[in-house]
Image: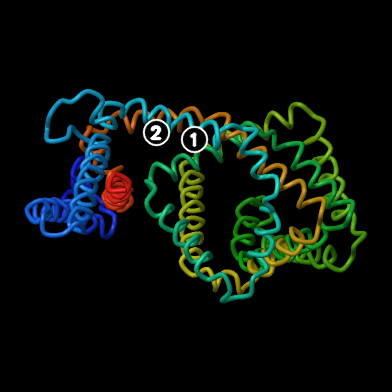
Amino acid sequence: MTSPPPLSRFNPAQPGAAGMKAAATGLLVLMAAVFFAARHYEGLHPAVGYVKAFAEAAMVGGLADWFAVTALFRHPLGLPIPHTAIIPRNKDRIGEALANFLQTNFLIAPVVARRMRNIDLAGAAGRFLQAPQGQETRIRQGASRLIADLFESLDDERLGGLVKTSVANRIRKMEVAPLLGHALASAINEDRHVPMLEATIRWTARALDANEELIREMVKKRVNWVLKLAGLDEKMSDSVVNGLRKLTVDMQTEPAHPVRIKIEEALAQLANDLQTKPETRAKVEEMKEQLLDNRSVSLWLDTLWQKGREAIIRAARNPDAAMAGKLGEVLQSMGQSLEKDARMKRAINQFARRAVAGMAASYGSSIVKLVSETVRGWDAQTITDRLENAVGRDLQYIRINGTLVGGTVGVLLHALDAL
């Protein structure tokens, strides 16, 4: 794998800059040749004097502009003439000036807030979320690809550990007993506990049928030996099994069965204890800590993270499919709300404006420092090459224009002198 070129050799030359430099130099050489030829044949005709004057002044103008352009970036002819190689000598000051320009015009909180005042981020997000499948594909695919690449590039083990630790710490800080008590009380008040209770009764009946022989053996082992001698242990086991079976049937068919009422009273008392009784709440918190310390729960949290991460990457890799399902319907509904609800739009735009302005206030100085230190870290040749190549064609046009303007002025002066 090849390494990238060093910074000092990075030379993004502007297209045509080298050709323009050759043209400007060639024009200067041409004017010198014309001057010497005109000087040689000056006595043949008065018009040759005008040609000589043009070429002479053109050489002076071209050389002056060559000197000026060269002095910006280096010492002309390598001579340490004062006030030349201006940019290399002042690169640190240029970096500071550039950084201050960025800070003054872009990275001050009031400036950022003022520039964002007319930007409708909420409306743009709403239109994007409502876009039918296939529209704004490049934006959506680009954003999705970025999200997928980000999740795939992050250290899975470390990030998963952070997520798991964050979830566990959040649960530890949360007192779950009152929440469980409130949820159970609400379920009882709205009769949402009834299906769960009936399901428990049906499960008990099925468990009784599946373990009938085991129950019979347990009863026979515990009856008195006198009953065994009398042959009553079989009848006792039949009575117990039949009684349990009748109890489950009666509980399923009679909503007002005494046992069901007792169970519902016990559930109501538990809901109250979870919310008000310190001893019960302490026991629930202890159980919660034991569960969080259990390795099985830790593995379960790992599984949740992996499934969530895979789902995010899968949806990001295929954004059109994700937008086409239920998620797409939800996002489109959110988009409609963002675009039509003026109050929500105003609140989101205000939040975004404050967030960006806050980032500018918090990190603007760091960005400015980064720019300044980056420019200061460049060697003189690097910054010279970059700036010269950025404006290369225009610099050579200055030389060409100086040559032509100088020649024109020379002709005018020669004409005035002849008159």
- Identify the mark nearer the N-term, 1 or 2: 1
Within 10 angstroms of label 1, few (less than 14), some, or many (20 or more) residues?
some
Q: Quadrant of the N terminus?
A: bottom left
Q: Residue furthest front?
A: 419
Label of residue 102 in the image: 1
Residue shown at 69% from the left, 61% from the top: 126
State the image coordinates of residue 40 (x, y, percent, origin top left): 6, 53
Could you tell me which residue is drawn at 60 percent across and 65 percent down? 213
Q: 199 or 334, which lies in front?
A: 334
Identify the element where label 1 is drawn. helix
Q: Quadrant of residue 285?
A: top right
Q: Is residue 398 visible?
A: no
Q: Seen in the image, is 290 located left or right of residue 262?
A: left
What kind of residue is marked 2?
Val
Q: Amino acid at mark 1?
A: Leu
- The answer to whether marks 1 and 2 mark residues whose Cβ atoms lie closer than 8 Å is yes
The residue pinned by badge 2 equals 371
| Point 64% across, 62% down: residue | 216
